[in-house]
Amino acid sequence: MGASKFTAWRITFFVPAFFQALGFVAVPFCIILGLVGSLSVSIVVMIIFSLFVQAACGMTFGVVPFVSRRSLGVISGMIGAEGNVGAVLTQLIFFKGSKFSKEKGITLMGVMIIKCTLPLFSIYFPQWGGMFFGPSSKKVSEGDYYLAEWNSKEKDKGFHHASLKFAENCTTERGRNFNTSI
């Protein structure tokens, strides 16, 4: 399957990521927020900006289970912690004791959103593909991907069953364009 043929999973994940990364949604509101002079307009723009930011956060956590079933808690914790670290760094760089005015800081925060979101384009799952490349030519299935996290001793003890069930669910939900089995 070529890179131009998008599956439902790729569209569901990468279209919002594309708009978020290129700043079509959050950044203009962030820039507008730095430019408005009225409190009432600022509040409206902040609410709209917040809705899109919350949607982006939800999208990020929606992808977490697909990265690694075995390390789901670790990955969720890392994503949450990195969001908090990003908020603290943004505060320190653009607002707390900064040479920038608050308005300029908010505008620069919008630029930072673009730069920090660009790595989303590099996410690649061998069984589904990524933003610019289709699935692996090696015909990797969900079962191959998720069961590779477990060694033979752990499989003998049955630790992999939850990952196998998740892989089966992923296979049934990915559509008719794929003909692989677990």
Image: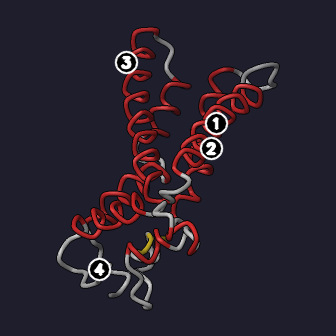
Q: Closer to the camera, 141 or 24?
A: 141
- The answer to the question of whether label 2 and label 1 lie on touching residues, with beta carbons closer than 8 A, is yes
Task: Give the image location of residue 7, x and y in percent.
Answer: 27, 71
Residue wearing tag 3: 44
Q: Tell me what residue is drawn at x 29 percent, y 67 percent.
A: 168
Amino acid residing under circle 1:
Ala
Relative side of 141 to 87, left or right: left
Residue depth check, mark 4 versus mark 3: number of the one nearer the observer: 4
Q: Is residue 56 above or below residue 142?
A: above
Amino acid residing under circle 3:
Val
Q: CA distance from mark 2 to mark 4?
A: 32 Å
Task: Give the image location of residue 79, x and y in percent.
Answer: 58, 43
Task: Give the image location of residue 21, x and y in percent.
Answer: 50, 52
Q: Tell me what residue is drawn at x 51 percent, y 14 percent.
A: 37
Amino acid residing under circle 4:
Lys
Amino acid residing under circle 2:
Met
Residue wearing tag 1: 81
Where does the C terminus fall, quadrant-wise? bottom left
Q: Which numbered disc flags the more N-terminal residue, 1 or 3?
A: 3
Q: Tell me what residue is drawn at x 44 percent, y 84 percent.
A: 136
Where does the N terminus fall, quadrant-wise? bottom left
Which element type, helix, strand or loop, lies under badge 3?
helix
Residue depth check, mark 2 versus mark 4: number of the one nearer the observer: 2
Q: Which numbered disc flags the more N-terminal residue, 4 or 3?
A: 4
Residue wearing tag 4: 5
Relative side of 94 to 106, left or right: right
Relative side of 49 to 78, left or right: left
* Dot 4 crowding, Cα within 10 Å, few <14, some 14–19, many 20+: few
* Dot 2 crowding, Cα within 10 Å, few <14, some 14–19, many 20+: few
Residue wearing tag 2: 78
